[in-house]
Amino acid sequence: MIESFRWIIKFEIYDIQSLYFDPYQAIQLAQDLKKEKINMVELPQTQSNCIAFSQCLFDLIRGKNIGFYQSEEVRLSLINCKVVYSSRGWRIVKKSGTKKIDLAVALAMASYGAVIAPEELESIIEGRGVGKRPSAEQDW
């Protein structure tokens, strides 16, 4: 995986500002990428953070403000999601316990990082904001 990022960096294929990651899931990868001078931003999958990044992706999709290249993996991951309201807000959950939604969660985290300002990130991580809620529970 690191070799892929080195290639992207070497040829400046993308203007990578930051990569958002869950420290519980990817701490070693994050440490390796920091050595490659990539700005790594911890975004633990707490309930507050999940609500914030889920809402961001939901709003982008609903508003048709995000485009996707044709990818069966992305399509299946999004199909395996639904948004559910809890007492704290809306968030992405699995439709079925056996279906994978990791790519949808990564997409939500990346979208969130692309949309928010750095000072907003601090308030969300500290639990001081969760965004707007969609009007009803929906499948994506």
Image (spheres, rainbow, N blue to C red):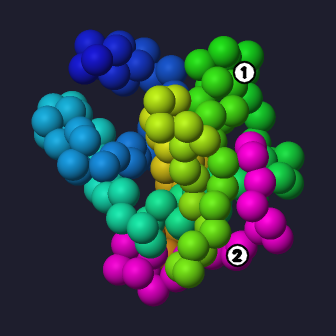
Instruction: Report crowding for label 2: few under 14, some 14 to 19, many 20 or more residues within 10 A (C-alpha).
Output: few
Determine whether 79 is above or below 130 in the image: above
Query: In this picture, is 67 found above or below 8?
Result: below
Q: Say if residue 87 shows up in the picture.
A: yes
**Taking 140 as reference, is 13 above or below it?**
above
Mark 1 and mark 2: span between their CA atoms?
27 Å
Q: Secondary structure under badge 1?
A: loop
Q: Which residues are magenta?
A: 123-140
> Is 100 or 20 nearer to us in this picture?
100
Residue drawn where x is 25% and y is 41% of the image: 25
Would residue 117 appear left or right of 59 to someone viewing this image? Answer: left
Q: Amino acid at mark 2?
A: Lys
Q: Secondary structure at mark 2?
A: loop
Residue 59, horizontal then vertical, whole percent: 75, 58
Q: Nearer the viewer, mark 1 or mark 2?
A: 2
- The disc at residue 69 is 1
Return the disc, 1 or 2, that comes first in the chain's sequence.
1
Residue pictured at 42% horizontal, 67% vertical: 47
Residue type for callout 1 = Tyr
Q: At 55% across and 37% down in the image, what residue appears?
A: 96
Please give the label number shown on residue 132: 2
Does any portion of residue 10 appear in the rendered image?
Answer: no
Q: Look at the picture and state if 130 lies above or below 58.
A: below
- Indicate the position of residue 8 as horizontal and vertical percent values: 41, 19
Instruction: Tell me where residue 100 appears, x and y as whole percent.
Output: 49, 30
